[in-house]
Image: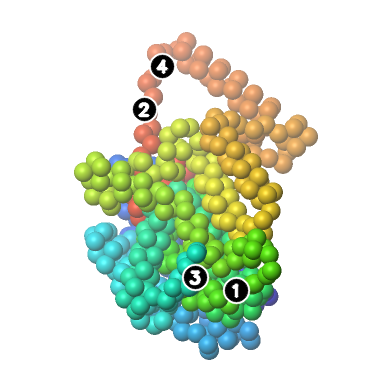
Amino acid sequence: MREYLLTLCITAAVTYLLTGPVRKFAIVAGAMPEIRARDVHREPTPRLGGIAMFFGLCAGLLVADHLTNLNEVFEKSNEPRALLSGAALIWLIGVLDDKFEIDALIKLGGQMIAAGVMVMQGLTILWLPIPGVGTVALTQWQGTLLTVALVVITINAVNFVDGLDGLAAGMVCIASAAFFMYAYRIWYSYGIEAAAPATLFAAILMGMCLGFLPHNMHPARIFMGDSGSMLIGLVLAAGAISVTGQVDPDLMNLYTNSERSSVHQMVPVYIPLVMPLTIIAIPAADLILAIVRRTWRGQSPFAADRGHLHHRLLEIGHSHSRAVLIMYFWSALIAFGTLTYSVNAGAMWIVLGVVILSAIGLVLLLLPRFTPRTPRWAEAFVPPRYRRRRAAGLAAEAAVALSGEAGESEPQPRTPVVVGVSGVNGATAVGPRSRSAR
């Protein structure tokens, strides 16, 4: 565990330290597209944040290769090299798209080629555990097609959800944390060495997201762009493929005298089928809804619109930060709920806990205008908008200003701010930002 944590910290540190210079490079290189009609950020923001994330990935793999225990992953498996090859290819395609806006079909072809490169080097699905049937071995073509499909779906799901500051990086970080715990449990508790690569991939992915998030939280100073969103989507898919199609589920079979107990013990065997889906549950749902919505209207599935889940949260009145936190909440609930169920499938309190948390999430969705107020003794420790006295003072000042303006001249009409939708190439920022923050 210490070596995994060290790898995570090194990856996060390299990503964090490189993001600042990469931002300046993106400005010099002109990777700052002008504000489009569908964008909601108020000033051009540089992309290419994926450059820092890619070098963080390289640093994490390099450090892991020189550690005593993690070095065995590189000696016994070719999966880390396969991941690096596919990541380099998808990263180059993303960098070109951030700079030159390449066609969507070209990007789709590049994603399939990157997945094929990983398959050629051994990172592929070999078998599937099917409930009621057992372990089903796949032919080479079946494994290749299934692997490429999973990679492409995951990449585009993460890319579609990259629409608000810090949203994609935060959701992937939460999902990779749950996946790390699951893969580490398989590797450590069951003694299955084949789960070590997936555990390493999850730790590195957490480091990439944690290192980039401070620069990408609202108001974002830099967007990850396609070079970042497609990269973390590919790493997420690689971990899911490794633990689903490489780990032999028969090694986790535990036989007991009780039939009911045997069913409970067999839950971890079938969780690999569900866990990768829960990791991208919300992004995949957004992706499916977007494709259905656009094709129903006769549009291209890759055409931008304002129907994404996170933009619907903005339209019903949630602030930018609150919309992001709600998406974080649902991602954590799905991923960690599944993880907890895999540990103890017979506990009723797990189901009750998920139901209660789901109810809380629904309440948060239905209260977009609710602003919590803190006790007076704690007002010094919270932002000004949550302070009673400060809020009352601001309201009084606004009323005085409005009455004064009404007495001097006719009120000027306000220009409405249209909440648009970001493109599929980066996050957005709602509200003006001071240039001094740069």
Quadrant assignment, res 344: bottom right
Between the C-alphas of marks 2 and 3, the distance is: 63 Å
Q: Earlier in the sequence, mark 2 or mark 1?
A: 1
Percent from the top left, x then y, of residue 395?
A: 59, 22
Picture residue at 54% right of the left edge, 43% below the top:
326
Give the residue pinned by disc 1: 252
Residue 65 to residue 374: above or below: below
Contact (CB < 8 A) between labels 2 and 3?
A: no
Picture residue at 60% right of the left edge, 20% below the top:
396
Amino acid marked by disc 1: Met
Amino acid marked by disc 3: Gly
Which of the pair 42/265 is nearer the observer? 265
Kindly identify which numbered label has been placed on residue 2.
Answer: none
User: Would residue 138 be found to the left or right of residue 329 on screen?
Assistant: left
Give the residue pinned by disc 3: 134
User: Tag 3, which secondary structure?
Assistant: strand
Amino acid marked by disc 4: Pro
Contact (CB < 8 A) between labels 4 and 2?
A: no
Q: Earlier in the sequence, mark 3 or mark 4?
A: 3
Q: Quadrant of the N terminus?
A: bottom right
Q: Is residue 227 visible?
A: no
Between the C-alphas of marks 3 and 4, the distance is: 73 Å
Kindly identify which numbered label has been placed on residue 411.
Answer: 4
Give the residue pinned by disc 2: 415
Q: Earlier in the sequence, mark 3 or mark 1?
A: 3
User: Would residue 132 be found to the left or right of residue 284 on screen?
Assistant: right
Viewer-nearest of labels 3 and 1?
3
Q: Earlier in the sequence, mark 2 or mark 3?
A: 3
Between the C-alphas of marks 2 and 1, the distance is: 63 Å
Percent from the top left, x then y, of residue 415?
A: 36, 27
